[in-house]
Amino acid sequence: MSENVAAERTTNYIKQIKGSVLYKGGAVAASFLAIPIMISYLGAVQFGVWSTLLTIMSWVVFFDLGIGNGLRNKVAEALAKGQEALARSYISSAYSLIGFVAVGLWLVFLFFSYQLSWQHVFNTSAVSEDELRYSVQIAAAFMLLNFWVGLITALLGAVQKSALISLGQLVTNGFVLIISYVLYHFFDARISYLAWIYGIGALGGNFLLSVWFYNTYKYLRPGYSLDREHLIPLLSVGVRFFIIQLAVLVVFTTDKVLITQLFGPEYVTEYEVVFKLFSVVAFLHTLISSPLWSAYTDAYHREDAGWIVKMLRTQLKLYGLVVIGLCVLAIVAQFIIGIWIDRAFVVSMPLVISVAAFVAVSTWNNIFAIMLNGAGAVNVQLYTALAAMLLNIPLALLMVKVLGMGVEGVVFAATLSLLFSAVLLPLQVYRLTRTVKSDVTLT
């Protein structure tokens, strides 16, 4: 193993962190500033509906059959082995397949959007049925178009340029902040207006990244191709990622739907504000960990176990700071929210503590999941994710219906469902790093 390659990988990793801190910091700041504007613009009930709508629309991203993550791994592996033509073939096949999937999903969704009662879905009569349906259709159209264009984020990860993904988020969030301010001062409160600006912002950010990427990496520009020889490896890796994503979807994004149905959409606003505050810690950790995915892929296929172990030890040391940060934030959360949103906006301490615990456990799991994703060793993660998916909703109903807990019960249930991963993923990583030099692939 060339020491120059390892040193270059580490240097690039640090560079990506610096860029991510700058761009992601701006994106988070823009997102935070937009929240109180949106609450003032829509009111608590409509904002709760809008927040739930965004969550439901984000589910669309998970229906790429894991192609995005499979593409990231396969392109990174091909480039690590100097197989640029193969990388381009994977890219071409992925774009072609996702294009067909997106069109198919849009046609199915358009049909069913007229069959559902959206007021029933969102458990509210505060927004008209026509306005809800139109808002959902606009959001879905942009999400599905971005479903295709958004493959660029997987490719940026594959070439270890993850800081630029944060730049795209900064463009999106900055645009949303500016237009939300304009809406608040000059337009009537309508959820459909936010659906338009979110869609345009997200699509615009990924489009600009795509222009940069294919001008920089001209040899990776895709053509039209649905080569079975390249689709099968993508789907083989991708389907496992897809099942994991689907399981994660249930655990991480059904909370708002459960809260809407069990308590009402107005309670989603309290949950969203608390979760948004603690997401700062998760975002900061993501800045540090996400550039490692494809770096781990590169190191794994070059059999550089020493570099992998070194990075894992660094991540575990940083996790201590994450726990300290969460404890401090839990203590001052109510004070910060009073300044940020409004002193009259009250959040419960049990909810604050439960969200802090959830972020602590999910961050711990992420340290090991990133490494396993990079190596393509995802079977243990698959099984634990499925267990979490099956347990999350029953546990939430138990906490609320039987034990009489409030909104915090929904979050606590999600935390409990993640404990299998918290134990088994570190064990899988330990086993993998001890056998990587003998070229044993534990998948």
Image: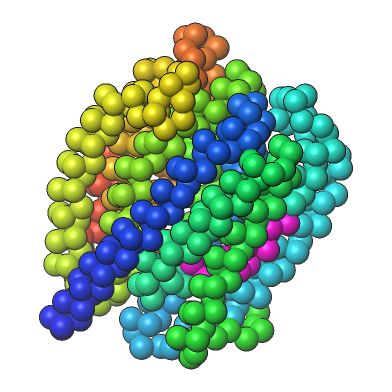
**Quick check: 261 left or right of 332?**
right
Magenta span: chief secondary structure: helix
Image position of 377 with respect to 268: above or below = below
- Quarter holding the N terminus is bottom left
**Quick check: 160 left or right of 144?**
left
Q: How many marks?
A: 0
Residue sitting at x 77%, y 49%? 137
**Which region shows up in magenta?**
140-153
> In this view of the protein, can residue 173 be seen by the observer?
yes
Closest to the observer: 228 or 14?
14
Residue sitting at x 20%, y 56%? 312
Closest to the observer: 176 or 439?
176
Closest to the observer: 140 or 158?
140
Residue lying furthest front: 185
Residue sitting at x 63%, y 21%? 264
Image position of 180 with respect to 227: above or below = above
Q: Is residue 151 magenta?
A: yes
Horizontal and vertical percent position of residue 416: 38, 28
Horizontal and vertical percent position of residue 204: 60, 66
The colour scheme used here is rainbow
Q: Is residue 79 magenta?
A: no
> In this view of the protein, can residue 373 be seen by the observer?
no
Horizontal and vertical percent position of residue 424: 30, 42
> In the picture, residue 27 is in which quadrant?
bottom left
> In the picture, residue 80 is in which quadrant?
bottom left
Horizontal and vertical percent position of residue 165: 44, 64
- Quarter holding the C terminus is bottom left
Image position of 380 with respect to 107: above or below = above
Closest to the observer: 81 or 12?
12
Residue sitting at x 35%, y 72%? 160
> In the picture, residue 2 is in which quadrant?
bottom left
